[in-house]
Image: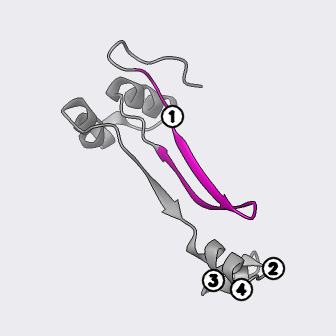
Amino acid sequence: MIQSCNSRCQLQNHAIIRQISGEEIISGAQRVHVPELLEERAKACGIDVNTITTYIDSFRYGAPPHGGFGVGLERVVMLFCVLNNIRKTSLFPRDPLRLAP
């Protein structure tokens, strides 16, 4: 669990979730942008920090805080077409019994 941030910034996590008829269609968040925190979390997760130094250094040397979002197009189509299952809108639906697309 993230408890604090260094003195240069205030740790914030802004999540974006938009819904239509109670169904999530868009979600997103702001990336962690504190290099020391990224290194700490990588080590805690067993990731070799040397393999991601370029990514971490981008925040150390000037990349601003940023984030993004993604639209669930299949979910939007399901709601627009009033379908009862998202698999009906997918070209290759996920299924526990499906072995190939």
> Measured from the top left, where is residue 97 in percent x and y?
76, 80
Nearer-N-terminus badge (4/1): 1
Q: Is residue 78 magenta?
A: no
Q: Is residue 28 magenta?
A: yes
Mark 2 is surrounded, within 10 Å at the Cα level, by few (under 14), some (14 to 19) or many (20 or more) other residues, namely few
Q: Which residue is mark 2?
A: 84
- Element at badge 4? helix
Report if the CB atoms under discs 2 and 4 are less than 8 Å apart. Answer: yes
| Snapshot quadrant of residue 47 | top left
**Which numbered disc, 2 or 3, marks the residue that appears first in the sequence?**
2
Which of the pair 70/56 is nearer the observer? 70
Q: Are marks 3 and 4 in contact (CB under 8 Å)?
A: yes
**Residue lying at 27% horizontally and 35% vertically, measured from the top left:** 59
**Mark 1 vs 2, N-terminal side:** 1
C-alpha separation, residue under disc 4 versus residue under disc 1: 34 Å
Residue behind mark 1: 13
Residue ID for mark 4 = 88
Q: Are marks 3 and 1 in contact (CB under 8 Å)?
A: no
Type of amino acid at the residue the image marks with label 1: Asn
Q: The C terminus is located in which quarter?
A: bottom right
Disc 2/disc 3 C-alpha distance (Å): 13 Å
Highlighted range, magenta: 10-29
Q: Residue furthest left?
A: 61
User: Comparing marks 2 and 3, which lies closer to the viewer?
Assistant: 2
